[in-house]
Structures are given as structure tokens and as C-alpha cells.
Image (tube, rainbow, N blue to C red):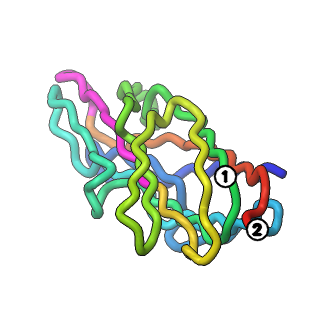
Amino acid sequence: MAKRTALRPRGRARLWAALALALAGPCPALAQGTVSVLPVQGLRFGVLASGIPAAVSPLDGGRRATIELVGTGTVSLRFELPSRLEGGHGRGVLPLRFRPGDGRVTFPGSAQVLVFDPSQPVSFTIPPGSGGATVYLGGSVDADPRQPPGAYDAGIAVTVVVASSAT
């Protein structure tokens, strides 16, 4: 069974870029009864300077997107990634990029880290007794020197498929 989550954030003043996987707080969704999907934090670029690209690392705790997966089983994730942030009222768009290494999966109590390319599906197993996994997402945006200030946003759809339960 697949669970697809798609959320669109609200923009902020100035040249803010917001890319969210979550609203203000966690929003549990169930995938096949074995893994709960909890969007925790959206990807936040903050205030951008005209003409200067900005990147958010999946290691940046204050700005990276975070999703908690609670449960056990073999999980496959697929992100539908936008290629741009859009501004309202004719402000145009900001090119958005996701590259290999912009995705990470960590497991509580383990040193194991899975680094992945968010533009490609990723699969992993959450072992029994581990409590789950945490998925982090970073990305990059380019602000043209003539880019008008304002709020820019985009949405990401995340599909989570639990292939089997670990026992």
C-alpha cells in the first residue's frame, strides 16, 4: 500500500523561499499499518540575496526538510520534486535543484547513514526494535539578479511504500 503526501506551504515576506513537506506540526499518516509517516519540518531557504545561489544541506538541522518514519519493514520512498519555486502576483520563478547527496536516512541508535539522490527512488529496511528512521532532504535554489522580492514556494509529493513487515 502506498501513502502519498503533498503539501504546499505559505510564503513569507521578501525573497523567502519555502519548500515544505509539512505544515506547522507533525501530521501522522499510515502506510500499510506498519510504518507511520510524520512530516516534521519543511525545507527552508530563508531570505535570499538577488543573484546569489543558496543551498541547504541535509545536515543543516534548522533548514533541511525532515520526515520521521516510525515502525518496521522494507520501505521505498519516491519524491516528486519541483524544478522551481513560484512567486505569486507575476513575480516569476526561481530554479530549484536536487542533487545526489541531498537526501539522507538515519536510524536511531545506529551509526548507519544512507545517502541518496532524491530524484531517484530509495529503498531501505527499518529493522525491528529500532524505532524507525529519519529522512532528511536538502536542495539548492538560484536567485536571478533581476528577481523581484517576494514570497516563493513549491510543494513536494512523497510516496511511501511499505513492501513487507519485518518480524
Residue 15 vs 7, above or below: the answer is above
Residue 143 placement: quadrant? top left
Q: Is residue 144 left or right of residue 43?
A: left
User: Type of residue at label 2?
Assistant: Thr
145 drawn magenta: yes
> What residue is pinned by disc 1?
75
> What residue is pinned by disc 2?
34
Q: Percent from the top left, x then y, of residue 163? A: 77, 50
Q: Closer to the camera, 120 or 163?
A: 163
Query: How far is mark 2 from mark 1, CA to CA?
Result: 10 Å
Q: Closer to the camera, 87 or 120?
A: 120
Q: Is residue 7 left or right of residue 41?
A: right
Magenta residues (range)? 136-148
Residue 116 placement: quadrant? top left
Mark 1 Cα shell of 10 Å, populated few (<14), some (14-19), many (≥20)? many
Q: Closer to the camera, 152 or 21?
A: 21
Instruction: Indicate the quadrant containing the C terminus: top left, top right, bottom left or bottom right.
Output: bottom right
